[in-house]
Amino acid sequence: MSNNATQLIHSIPVDPLTGAIAVPIYQTSTFVQDAPGVNKGYDYARTGNPTRGTLEQVIAQLENGHTGIAFSSGLAAIDAVLKLLESGDEILAVDDIYGGAFRLFTHIYRKFGITVNYTDTTRIENVFNAVTAKTKLIWIETPTNPTLKISDIEAIAGIARANHCLLCVDNTFASPALQQPLLLGADLVVHSATKYLGGHSDLIAGLVVTREKELGEKIKFIQNASGAILSPFDSWLVIRGIETLHLRIKQHGINAQVVAEFLTTHPDVENVYYPGLKTHFNHGIAARQAKGFGGIVSFTLKNDTEKAATSFVTSTRYFKLAESLGGVKSLLCHPAQMTHKSIPAEQRRAAGVADSLIRLSVGLEEVSDLVHDLDRAFTSLHSTPSKNKTVTA
Ligand SMILES: *Cc1c(COP(=O)(O)O)cnc(C)c1O
């Protein structure tokens, strides 16, 4: 099934009770019953809430899955998927993984006897070689955070199937407007809806979508049993964000392509990471499995030091220095000191996150203003540092 703007906009239903075109916010904790166990489909709002339920249906449709399940954060969504596992199971994960997922795997799940092997999943033979009899879950992000590595979802899904393990794709960077991993054979998709789905840097939310009903029931059970549900208001905000997802993603991609091409020409830049560049290692796979390349661009400086990177990220005007991504306003961050601080330096570098790597979340401003902003920050790298540098707000 195609996933176009029409499908996206009309996946959000009109309220059957009143005809309200916007989804009502059911701000309630419980639902009155006619007799014990006799209700209108809802009994307690941790178990089910109509506003959250609408979001869960919408995301299931957009990802072409069976069941959508909404959580209070992207990490709560990832946590719910991990709770499918048992002590002794192994996870095979992409090496350039989101820092928070790494922390969860390492510091929480390891003590429950779940181990994680990391490999560069951009080469299919690495996945093939790293799967063991104990592997129960293959975990990939594509594109990855922050080096925009691309893995072949369909090929990895084939390996997962042959080895009777699940494939979960963190689809945060692409969003369902660009990429639908379940159609390529993945079993589960997770999202930090905090990013492109919400789209306005005003909420924290997570989503899981399963391809099959049975797996959906298991995650729903975990959602209710562990309780990290998304609130009705935040569910409503994500639905509202989704209404413009196609439009935003399209422009993020156009702007990011311009920014990436500008960076490749700049003498201070060592490497540019963007799947939309023909020089990207897996550009061909990205072009085949996604409808676009997204809004995140990373690059390293010729002067590969934290000091130079710090100077750069404090010199921009429109690119605001902040963690997170996927909003209307451009952001930039220095992963080594921010999002990826919890990964040991050695392992971080081995995964390609250099000391000077800077990640841009290219927003929806005029792209010429964004290019000019970056250009000015490069210039400031060469000016004599002043002690009380002011950053224009
Ligand atoms: C932000 C992010 C997460 C975590 O989501 P939160 O909503 O911050 O909990 C997971 N995966 C990726 C790829 C992310 O960018």
Image: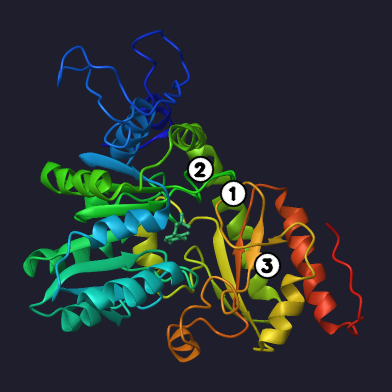
Q: Secondary structure at mark 1?
A: loop
Q: Secondary structure at mark 3?
A: helix
Mark 3 or mark 1, earlier in chain: 3
Cα distance in 3D space between marks 3 and 2 = 28 Å
Q: Position of residue 145 (x, y in %)?
A: 47, 68
- Image quarter where the N terminus lies is top left
Residue 311 x %, y %: 76, 78
Give, as a three-letter code, the residue at label 2. Gly
Ligand 1 closer than 8 Å to the CB at disc 2? no
Residue, x 29% and y 73% (percent of image)?
Answer: 93
| Residue 217 seen in the figure | yes
Q: Residue furthest top?
A: 18
Q: Nearer the viewer, mark 3 or mark 1?
A: 1
Please provide percent x and percent y for residue 162.
7, 68
Residue 262 is tagged as 3
Check the image and report above or below for 7 versus 218. Answer: above
Whether pointer 3 and pointer 1 mark residues with C-beta atoms closer than 8 Å, the reply is no
Front-most of residues 29 and 118: 29
Q: Nearer the viewer, mark 3 or mark 2?
A: 2
Q: Is residue 330 above or below residue 131?
A: above
- Residue under circle 1? 327
Left or right, 326 with reference to 86? right
The disc at residue 198 is 2
Circles 1 and 2 in contact, beta carbons < 8 Å: yes
Q: Is residue 112 left or right of residue 53?
A: left
The CA span between labels 1 and 2 is 8 Å
